[in-house]
């Protein structure tokens, strides 16, 4: 991978702030956008910014086709059928959609939902609400010292009454890549009726993910973490589940037939897409998928292993640092959460900001995990296709500068 060439595709890197370049190490929160994506969005707004589906005129047909092509690109990208890909606003909305439709029908008194301590709030709060509302039990898979899931007692957590396993593919803090394929097999051998939702918000942008290969029932992710626009997300689900689920929202575009007192609804995915969608966003997401495909997901994963290995080695040389999650780069995604003895994560992030080094500090929407680690906050640096060793070196220099200030 030619990182300099890739970097030149991202107009934001032409910016200087206080005459210094931007060192972007926060792609786990949101990725930057290449020119191809910005151009695709801009082309929609300048050349054919009309509504889809309903128009019979050329511009509307053009917009409808572009939006349809985007859905096709996304489905191919994850090995899915076209009618199993629902466009939503973000991964969070996907989880809430499932909780409020499928969850309403299946999470009942006497049942249980299993999730993990390393989840993003988006994959824990909706299940807290649904289990409380219906008198069901929420069970949590714990982690070990390395930040791996403790799976020895899985058959005590999952049983015949467990209706849902909601699990992240990759932790947005520890970087742990969970063995979801094996886990799904195990869960389904304990209870063949269990439904598995995989939170792929951190995996789909960074590695090859194929829904059939994983064997899950729902898979969710966000467009803005994979070079696409904000306000775009995907809910993938097995067609038979989508068919039995009630709609999430009601109104235009999702109906088949409307009478004064009752209505019928379209087939999936349109049944779950009420109202005018984020047309430009969907088209932008299609362009993002094309860009990632051009680079190759295997190449992206390999690059992230290499840069993470380099960063782990350099960070481990610093006295007083504590790094969380798997120790080996090949066992984790390109995200490193750490704390520095004697320096609050927010102070560290602020000092790094003096040199335009963008990292995140806080709980990263994973409060239960931080509690488990005995922390209120951590600093998180994350990598993507446009990061190179120079960015890691800048981070190391920034941390050394903070150490000098605070000691
Ligand atoms: C693992 C994981 N799940 C879910 C989300 C929620 O994504 P969004 O805010 O785009 O809905 C995030 C965002 O950071 C995440 O890292």
Image: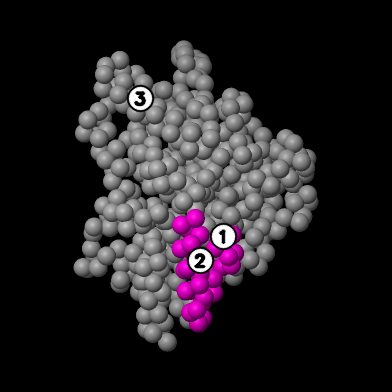
Task: Say whether marks 1 and 2 touch (CB < 8 Å).
Answer: yes
Disc on the earlier residue, 2 or 3 = 3
Q: Are marks 2 and 3 in contact (CB under 8 Å)?
A: no
Q: Residue at x 72, y 35 (%)?
A: 193
Mark nearer the N terminus (1 vs 2): 2
Q: Earlier in the sequence, mark 1 or mark 3?
A: 3
Q: Is residue 358 left or right of residue 197?
A: left
Picture layout, residue 356 above or below residue 227: below
Residue 377: say if magenta: no
Location of residue 304 with respect to 188 vertically, above or below: below
Circle 3: is it few (<14), some (14-19), or many (20+) Cα within 10 Å?
Answer: some
Disc 3 element: helix
Label 2 Cα neighbours within 10 Å, binned few <14 / some 14-19 / many ≥20: some
Residue 309 is covered by the magenta coloring: yes
Q: Residue beneath label 1, please?
A: 330
Mark 1 Cα-neighbour bin, 10 Å: few <14, some 14–19, many ≥20? some
Residue 103, compared with residue 257, is above or below; it is: below
Disc 3: which residue = 65
The part of the chain drawn in magenta is 302-331
Q: Secondary structure at mark 2?
A: helix
Q: Position of residue 299 (x, y in %)?
A: 46, 51
Q: CA distance from mark 1 to mark 2?
A: 8 Å
Residue 118 at x, y percent in the picture: 59, 57
Q: Residue at x 58, y 24 (%)?
A: 243
| Residue at numbered disc 2 | 309
* Viewer-proximal residue among 237 and 332: 332
């Amino acid at each position: 991978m030619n990182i300099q060439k890739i970097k030149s595709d991202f107009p934001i890197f032409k910016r200087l702030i206080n005459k210094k370049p931007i060192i972007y190490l926060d792609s786990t929160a949101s990725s930057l956008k290449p020119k191809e994506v910005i151009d695709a969005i801009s082309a929609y707004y300048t050349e054919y910014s009309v509504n889809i589906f309903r128009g019979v005129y050329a511009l509307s047909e053009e917009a409808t086709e572009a939006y349809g092509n985007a859905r096709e690109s996304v489905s191919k990208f994850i090995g899915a059928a076209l009618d199993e890909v629902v466009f939503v606003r973000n991964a969070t909305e996907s989880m809430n959609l499932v909780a409020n439709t499928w969850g309403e029908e299946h999470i009942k008194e006497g049942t249980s939902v299993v999730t993990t301590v390393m989840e993003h709030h988006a994959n824990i709060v909706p299940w807290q609400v649904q289990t409380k509302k219906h008198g069901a039990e929420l069970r949590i898979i714990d982690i070990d010292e390395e930040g791996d899931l403790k799976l020895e007692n899985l058959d005590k957590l999952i049983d015949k009454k467990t209706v849902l396993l909601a699990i992240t593919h990759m932790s947005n803090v520890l970087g742990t890549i969970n063995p979801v394929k094996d886990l799904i097999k195990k869960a389904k051998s304990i209870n063949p009726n269990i439904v598995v939702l995989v939170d792929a918000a951190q995996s789909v942008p960074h590695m090859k993910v194929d829904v059939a290969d994983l064997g899950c029932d729902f898979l969710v992710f966000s467009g803005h973490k994979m070079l696409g626009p904000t306000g775009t997300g995907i809910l993938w689900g097995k067609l038979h589940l989508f068919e039995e689920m009630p709609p999430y929202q009601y109104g235009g575009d999702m109906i088949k037939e409307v009478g004064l007192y009752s209505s019928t609804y379209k087939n999936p995915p349109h049944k779950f897409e009420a109202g005018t969608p984020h047309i430009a966003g969907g088209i932008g997401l299609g362009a993002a998928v094309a860009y990632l495909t051009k680079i190759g997901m295997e190449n992206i994963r390999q690059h992230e292993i290499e840069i993470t290995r380099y960063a782990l080695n350099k960070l481990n040389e610093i006295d007083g640092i504590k790094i969380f999650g798997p120790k080996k780069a090949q066992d984790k995604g390109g995200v490193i959460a750490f704390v520095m003895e004697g320096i609050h994560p927010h102070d560290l992030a602020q000092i790094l900001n003096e040199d335009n080094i963008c990292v995140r500090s806080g709980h990263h929407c994973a409060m239960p995990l931080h509690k488990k680690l005995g922390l209120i906050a951590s600093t998180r640096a994350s990598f993507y296709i446009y990061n190179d060793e120079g960015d890691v070196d800048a981070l190391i220099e920034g941390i050394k500068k903070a150490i000098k200030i605070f000691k």
